């Protein structure tokens, strides 16, 4: 019987093909094979993402995310029909969803770290521009604030991220910038305090000896003390500050006035020891040639004018030597963080300041003064290729 032909088999096949069609059968076979392949791919995907931290970069991490999502969508197409691996597919979907959640979380952390790195880079570049001419101004306070913000942002970047090593280099470089700027600002503020106090004392000392016909020995002694204090304060004005030039020019005036008062005191004391006359007789013959010190307002106006002259020259030199700025690479996973290598120029020589008229109508003659670099030489020299050892 087994050898006999089965006349009904061709009929069954013909009926089956008439119901579904050859192309439909082929599609079902293809889909079934795809379902099986998707299930097979799951283990490969799990192995590739068993240690997320070993994935080399953010692009590779995102590629794995896409691969997991695509595999999940394929497994969802497995029908709940006899002969299909439906339940197995559901188990695999559950496993992949857990893995996808881990990858998504890692991507969020990495993207946040990258965003912070780019924000810190932008602040670093903005701060560098504010102090590029080296002449101290209010811009330095703003630069200090930007570098402080950059440090805070970089310190928020977690370890074990693709940009964590770069962030460490950035922190080291930016902290040096911040500290250097802070030192200059502190020096300028202290020097301004000394300078202002010296000018005020000089004005008081001048007022004490304004009327030589009524001058007394105690007033001269007081004036001498105040001139000495004013001189000491000017001597303490840092040589690397914007105030240095004016402090030196005033110092010669103050010292001359100090000598005038000191000589007058010596004459009066000598007169009193040689004669039995009254003090008024000795002071009446005193002759003082006191040079009136300039007011604080006038001096600060001079300094502002000279700062503007320095800034114009420095800006012109910077524009002629810097050329076009290089593009910042978006590949922040690189270990070379060029953002913290914005270099500063070094200036040399002197700056010529043209004559100008103050607001009070007095005229200041043309003169030369030291260029910014000779007062703040070498600032930012470490900023050549990021953090240095």
Image (cartoon, rainbow, N blue to C red):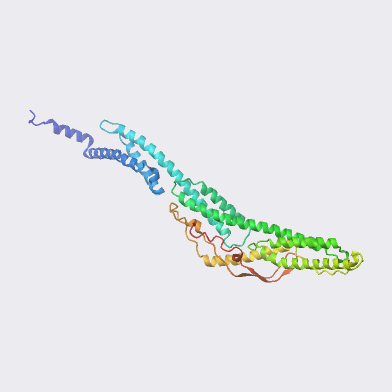
Residue furthest out toward the bottom = 366
Q: Nearer the viewer, residue 377 or 39?
A: 377
> Is there any visible trace of residue 74 in the rendered image?
yes
Quarter of the picture containing the N terminus is top left
> Is there any visible trace of residue 297 in the rendered image?
no
Residue furthest out toward the top = 1
Image: 381 above or below 114: below
Q: Quadrant of residue 370?
A: bottom right
The structure residue drawn at horizontal position 54% and vertical position 50%, both measured from the top left corner, is: 151
Total tally of numbered discs in the picture = 0
Q: Nearer the viewer, residue 309 or 35?
A: 309
Compared across the picture, whether 244 is left or right of 117 comes to right
Compared across the picture, whether 102 is left or right of 44 comes to right
Q: Quadrant of residue 71?
A: top left
The structure residue drawn at horizontal position 51% and vertical position 49%, both measured from the top left corner, is: 154
Image: 202 above or below 81: below
């Amino acid at each position: 019987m087994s050898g006999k032909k089965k006349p009904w088999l061709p009929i069954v096949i013909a009926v089956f093909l008439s119901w579904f069609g050859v192309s439909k059968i082929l599609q079902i076979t293809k889909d079934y094979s795809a379902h099986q392949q998707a299930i097979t791919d799951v283990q490969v995907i799990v192995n590739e993402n068993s240690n997320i931290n070993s994935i080399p970069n953010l692009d590779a991490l995102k590629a794995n995310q896409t691969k997991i999502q695509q595999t999940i969508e394929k497994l969802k197409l497995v029908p709940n029909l006899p002969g299909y691996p439906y339940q197995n597919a559901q188990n695999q979907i559950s496993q992949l969803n857990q893995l996808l959640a881990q990858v998504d979380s890692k991507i969020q952390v990495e993207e946040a770290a990258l965003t912070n790195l780019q924000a810190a880079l932008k602040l670093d570049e903005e701060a560098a521009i504010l102090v590029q001419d080296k002449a101290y101004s209010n811009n330095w306070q703003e630069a200090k604030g930007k570098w402080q913000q950059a440090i805070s942002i970089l310190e928020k970047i977690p370890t074990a991220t693709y940009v964590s090593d770069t962030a460490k280099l950035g922190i080291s470089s930016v902290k040096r910038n911040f500290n250097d700027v802070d030192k200059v600002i502190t020096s300028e503020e202290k020097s301004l305090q000394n300078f202002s106090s010296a000018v005020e004392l000089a004005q008081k000392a001048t007022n004490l000896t304004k009327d030589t016909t009524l001058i007394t020995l105690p007033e001269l002694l007081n004036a001498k003390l105040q001139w000495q204090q004013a001189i000491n304060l000017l001597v303490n004005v840092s040589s690397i500050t914007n105030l240095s030039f004016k402090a030196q020019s005033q110092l010669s005036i103050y010292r001359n006035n100090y000598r005038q008062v000191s000589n007058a005191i010596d004459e009066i004391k000598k007169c009193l020891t040689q004669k039995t006359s009254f003090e008024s007789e000795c002071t009446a013959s005193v002759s003082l040639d006191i040079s009136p010190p300039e007011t604080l307002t006038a001096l600060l106006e001079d300094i502002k004018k000279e700062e503007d002259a320095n800034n114009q020259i420095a800006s012109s030199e910077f524009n002629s030597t810097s050329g076009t700025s290089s593009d910042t690479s978006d590949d922040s996973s690189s270990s070379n963080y060029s953002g913290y290598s914005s270099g500063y120029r070094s200036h040399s020589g002197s700056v010529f300041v043209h004559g100008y008229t103050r607001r009070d109508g007095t005229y200041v003659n043309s003169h030369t003064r030291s260029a910014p670099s000779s007062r703040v030489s070498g600032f930012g020299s470490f900023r050549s290729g990021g953090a240095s050892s």
